Image (cartoon, grey):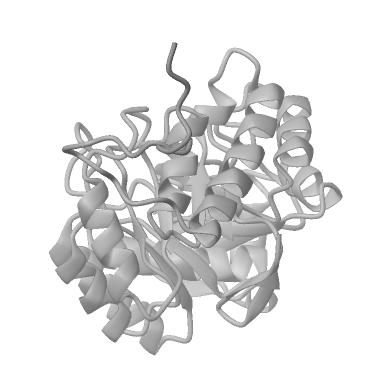
Amino acid sequence: MNVTINGEPREVPAGTTVEQLVRQVTTQDKGIAAALNGEVLPRRAWSARALADLDQVEVVTAVQGG
Amino acid sequence: MGSWELAGRQITSRLITGTGGATSLDVMSKVLKSSGSQVTTVAMRRVGGYALGGGSLLDVIRAAGAEVLPNTAGCHTAAEALLTARLAREALETDWVKLEVVADDITLLPDPVELLEAARALVADGFTVLPYTNDDPVLALHLERAGCAAVMPLGAPIGSGLGIRNPHNIAMICQQAGVPVILDAGIGTASDAALAMELGCDGVLVASAITRAADPEAMATAMRLAVEAGRAAREAGRIERRWHAALASSPAEGLITP
């Protein structure tokens, strides 16, 4: 199954959850948020949400900025 | 200096800082303390980048006793700004957003059409919207009518350090606004911040002018004092400008003749 995380393509096994994919790119626990196909997916829903082929996930955090 | 109200929150400091440009978390911590700033901005970016960020950034801000104000810097469309603001709300547990929607990456000037559209959508979605806007009194009124909690006109382009290029427009925005006016962008040095307050602004947002100064901690102190001085001067009521003749302050009578 092919998905994209933060713009990078990745191949993951069927049944992989958003939580599992996010953990491939960060160990950060607080101060992060994710969007699935352009919509915010609340943190509590990550572990129950299985990815579908071609899903696009963005994981963001706060950085320095004016 | 008395407190002021921003979107229902009582704040004593009228200097809002931006964390962009600080060379380390240690510098940022010192800047926050010296500035006395109680609100400071952050940007939202993909995890794992090179910018200083993540949990340690938020820890430094909270340790300094400041509130985090996420921005939508880098957004060029209302759609991008909406998603960025919603991600910020989820990540940082705040419904405050400094709304930035810029037209291009050369001038970083606000795109008024996309900005207004984004402001309306975010207000409808329950956000407390603080928009970075042009120094345009008409656009400022539209943003206020859209339900924004403040308007934040630029003095000059972001990071330019050119000060307040159109003080007349800033004064007009202040005069007509029913929400707080925060001068955002263009500040180069302390006198610019003082001028903003003298023109009637309720607050000033400074990032680069502090973080990229030769001594950021010292400049943070200078900006804090400038904002206080400018506010005090505004409240004290300055003298009239006399363009055509001087007005002696010493008595015209009782002059000594040799």
Q: Which residue ends up furthest to the front in the rendered image?
A: B258
Viewer-proximal residue among B235 and A8:
B235
**Residue B1 position (above or below residue B180):** above
Q: Quadrant of residue B139?
A: bottom left
**Left or right: where does residue B41 sit relative to residue B58?**
left
**Left or right: where does residue B163 sit relative to residue B5?**
left
Q: Quadrant of residue B18?
A: top right
Q: At which x and y percent is residue B2? A: 70, 66
Query: Quarter holding the C terminus of chain B?
Result: top left
Q: Is residue A14 visible?
A: no
**Residue B253 position (above or below residue B180):** above
- Which residue appears at 65% of the width and 16% of the height? B215
Q: At which x and y percent is residue B138? A: 15, 70
How many marks the image carries: the answer is 0
Q: At which x and y percent is residue A60? A: 55, 52
- Which residue appears at 70% of the width and 56% of the height? B38
**Left or right: where does residue B109 sit relative to residue B30?**
left
- Which residue appears at 39% of the width and 36% of the height? B248
Q: At which x and y percent is residue B251? A: 47, 38
Q: Is residue B40 visible?
A: yes
Viewer-proximal residue among A11 and A20:
A20
Query: Quarter holding the N terminus of chain B?
Result: bottom right
